[in-house]
Amino acid sequence: MARLQSLMLRVVCPLLVLGLTASPVYAEFVPRFDGRTFGLDVTGEYFTTDENLDGTDGSRESIVGDSFDTFSVKGNVDYSIKRNWIVGAGAEIVNASSSNENTFFNNLDSDRQATEFNNASVFTSFQLQSGTLRLVPTLRGTFTLQEVNKNTNDVVTGEGTNQAELGMWGIISTGSLEPYVYGGYRYQEDGRAHLMPWKVGSQLNLGQFFFRGEVGGHFTVKDDKYNSRRLERTNVTNRVNAGSFKYYSVNSNLIELRVEAGLPASKELELIVGGTHTLAGESVAYGFSVYGGLRYSQNPKDMRDVPDDELAERIADDNAASATADREERREKISPAKRAAPKRRVKKDEFTPQLEDYDPAMFEKEMKKKKKPKQ
């Protein structure tokens, strides 16, 4: 019962904070350019682990405590400056709890938890399209709101450092199947390791439903300054995070599996469910997560991306339909009697001046006749 109450608190508290602050949140989804002017992505994710992948050979090892769990609410809001250029901002709220029964490392409570407004971010994406190939360069800056204090006994809820990431998506649209890849470079301040995040996956579109599977993660491409003295960092995670390498580890490498499905609730709203599972790595937590989310699109042209030529045809059709509707609306404003009245016929000998019949001399003569006073 106590564990159920703890889980409910971890779920309810972040959602309550999110509702009170009305903060935009950030989620890592494949970028969408569907003609929407405004978009909102929100996800809630629960992650649990009781093992680490060792920092030397990648083998699984039990953590010092019993378990380490997190519940995060994250996502983003975005705005389309142009159809192929979006900007946005986001943030993340994390609730983390550790259960540590090892009295050697645990000099306070056996169970600890904290809920923190962890980080904020800004980003931009630009789409380049040629036929079925779409390239989407992205730039994201993440600013930490909770730095790691090694001298306290608070649970660590994030990496605790500012980050900047430059990456590129490659997406091929071939009807119902959309394979994609992503690669980037993530810079981290405070002497932390620089990482190369990556993803390889494919999306299957079945009407308005979609299913996605991908393998991704990150690799260390520049060593952490603590690489030669990992124990200083490990002592902190042993004490406050039950020994888990979920956050604040040294030179982490990660490979994980992600599956995801989506279905429309309406033209503007889409529901997302999914999960992840750790496959391999070093200096990372071994565990799994489940998540659910919402995607809202304001004024979407379509629920799926469309090529430029097809979009141009749709815009032309929309304009023609709009012009027809305008004519019908103006016609409805004319009374039936006027619409049924026959048009006045022009007499054969009636003078109907045309532009090509204009003669300045004749015009002046006619004007003089009009000015001549009546006798």
Image (cartoon, rainbow, N blue to C red):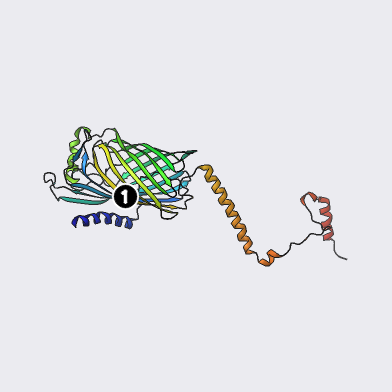
Rate crowding at label 1 as few (under 14), some (14 to 19) or many (20 or more) other CA atoms within 10 Å: some
Q: Nearer the viewer, residue 262 or 188?
A: 262
- Using the rendered view, name the quadrant where residue 233 is placed: top left
Q: Residue 302: image x %, image y %?
A: 48, 49
Residue drawn at 33 percent across, 51 percent down: 292
Residue 31 shown left or right of residue 152 in the figure: right
Residue 2 shown left or right of residue 29 in the figure: left
Q: Residue 238: image x %, image y %?
A: 17, 43
> Which SS class for mark 1?
strand
Residue drawn at 21 percent across, 40 percent down: 52
Q: Residue 356: image x %, image y %?
A: 78, 49
Q: Residue 48: image x %, image y %?
A: 24, 47
In the rendered image, the quadrant that contains the N terminus is bottom left
Number of marks in the rendered image: 1
Q: Nearer the viewer, residue 41 or 59?
A: 59
Residue drawn at 57 percent across, 50 percent down: 317
Residue 24 shown left or right of residue 34 in the figure: left
Q: Is residue 200 above or below residue 47?
A: above
In the rendered image, the quadrant that contains the C terminus is bottom right
Res 31 seen here: no
Residue at far left of view: 104
Res 50 seen here: yes
Question: What amino acid is labelled 1 in the image?
Answer: Tyr
Residue ID for mark 1: 291
- Using the rendered view, name the quadrant where residue 140 is placed: top left
